[in-house]
Image (cartoon, rainbow, N blue to C red):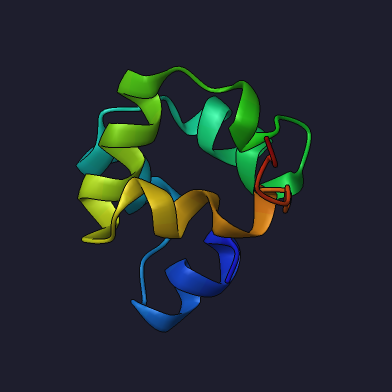
Amino acid sequence: MNINEILKEKQLSKYRFAKLSGISQTTINDICSGKVNLKNCTGETLYKLAGSLDISVESLLREHMEYRPACRK
């Protein structure tokens, strides 16, 4: 689930999300539009975004994570 879907589900505007998270509205718009990739955000930003959405950082990043098979020795 991406941020836009989560915002819609929680009935949050980007403006309200920015206020709740403490992240600038410009940054929120850039993340929601795909201009900024969540993988490039700082841990602090990810923590604030996830916390304001009441989800884990892992859930927030899930669609941006790539599968890597376990290493074999």
Residue at point 56% right, 73% down? 5
Instruction: Name the side, left or right, on which 61 lies relative to 17.
Output: right
Corner quadrant of residue 48: top left
Image quadrant for the N terminus?
Answer: bottom right
Q: Is residue 37 above or below residue 12?
A: above
Image quadrant for the C terminus?
Answer: top right
Residue 65 in percent (x, y) is at: 65, 48
Residue 59 in percent (x, y) is at: 42, 60
Residue at point 42% right, 25% down? 24
Instruction: Name the side, left or right, on which 47 lies relative to 64.
Output: left
Most foreground residue, 65 or 35: 65
Work out which residue is located at the far bottom of the displayed protein and give it: 9
Residue at point 48% right, 77% down? 8
Residue 47 in percent (x, y) is at: 28, 34
Most foreground residue, 47 or 7: 47
Corner quadrant of residue 20: top left
Corner quadrant of residue 13: bottom left
Work out which residue is located at the far right of the displayed protein and give it: 35
Work out which residue is located at the far front of the displayed protein and give it: 73
Instruction: Name the side, left or right, on which 69 lies relative to 53.
Output: right
Residue at point 39% right, 33% down? 46
